Image: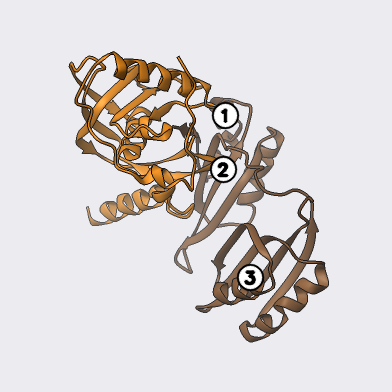
Amino acid sequence: MKATWFMLTMIGKDKPGMVAAISGALADHGVTLGETSMLRLGGNFTVMMMVSGAEDEQSLRNSLAPILESQGMCLHVDPIEGGLHKHVIPNVHVTVSGADRPGIVSQVTAVLAELGLNILDLESDVAGTEDKPIYIMQITAVSTLDIESIESALSAVRESGVSVSVSAIETYIG
Amino acid sequence: MALLEILQLPDERLKQVSEPVEVFDDELRAFIADLEETRLNGPAAVGIAAPQVGMFKRVVIIDCSTTRKPVPNHGYMVLVNPEITKWDGFEKGREGCLSVPDYTGNVIRATKITLSAKDPYGEPLQFDMEGYEARAAQHEIDHLDGMLFVDRVVSRRTDLFKRKVYQDGGTGKKS
């Protein structure tokens, strides 16, 4: 039988023990994890996890209710299509950094979208200080274009004072 | 010639340390031919190490001449008893493995290495390698020591670029 997957999104004020509490509650109810992403964003701990093995959404919510309360987390559940073993290997890496201002992500990703790049992973952070914040973004993506075409399409962004570098990801398999 | 079966995680044998080759005979060279056939059959495999097919001898094959964008390389190489004698620099790059299907991750490797080895007839070899080819050699030699790239994968947040920028900035301020 094909596994039914749900995507759980959980957020709460960061403190030690949150992952243990969540994964413990799920394991106790026979729920297994697939691919997950868990990280601290601005003092909050954020969790997105694919889970399977739950009867339905309500039973998932029931399994998690006690620890959500004790951990002070909120939960969002979506049934999802798809499953495991669907990885796509990225071949382009884009690094962006510059003085923080509104619109950097939008400016860069608009160009990438126009080129048909598919973003697999984007992480961004604000570094620097309160009065001199620096925006730093890393994108890994898949593209059929060569690096030079992507580079030149991003020249307008570069002229606006943001530093952008594009490099090919040549994945070594051995 | 024969296709050999590739061991995959969680097969414990992949963690075994391989023994140096002492006899350079036809049997060794026949095995190398099979290993190469197996490498060519592997999806997009650039390199392969003997323990990946359950032969715990220090033999690896790499061929970095077929990347999308050409990289500095020495072409097809059979390295018997390879040893890295010099390391320089470090960089992050993406790796996958025939023994770990459907997973790729970032690994930090030395940028430049000097490597000595024997060829299939026992003649000494020495190479200076850089970048992708140096990565290939390090990945394969790891196999000989029972090490897989998944043991070395770094978090996506591990960012050499940022650290470099920080260092440059730091030096700039002081001068």
Q: Is residue B102 left or right of residue B124?
A: right
SS of the residue under disc 1: helix
Q: Amino acid at mark 1?
A: Ser
Image coordinates of residue B44 in percent, x first then y, are 52, 26
Quadrant in which the N terminus of chain B appears: top left
Query: Callout 1 environment at 10 Å: few (<14), some (14 to 19), or many (20+)?
Result: few
Tell me which label, 1 or 3, sits earlier in the chain.
3
Disc 1 and disc 3 in contact, CB within 8 angstroms: no
Q: Is residue A42 left or right of residue A54?
A: left
Q: Is residue A160 left or right of residue B58?
A: right
Q: Quadrant of residue B57?
A: top left
Position above or below: A73 against B156: below
Q: Which chain is orange?
A: B
Q: Quadrant of residue B126?
A: top left
Q: Amino acid at mark 3?
A: Ala
Residue pictured at 22% horizontal, 52% vertical: B175
Q: CA distance from mark 1 to mark 2?
A: 18 Å
Circle number at residue A152: 1
Residue pictured at 78% horizontal, 50% vertical: A2
Position above or below: A57 against B153: below
Position above or below: B131 against B122: below
Residue pictured at 25% horizontal, 15% vertical: B25
Q: Nearer the viewer, mark 1 or mark 2?
A: 2
In the image, A78 versus B123, the foreground residue is: B123
Tell me which label, 2 or 3, sits earlier in the chain.
3
Give the colour scheme shown.
by chain
| Residue B107 shows in this picture | no
How many labels sit on residues?
3
Q: Which chain is brown?
A: A
Query: Callout 3 environment at 10 Å: few (<14), some (14 to 19), or many (20+)?
Result: few
SS of the residue under disc 2: strand
Query: Callout 2 environment at 10 Å: few (<14), some (14 to 19), or many (20+)?
Result: many
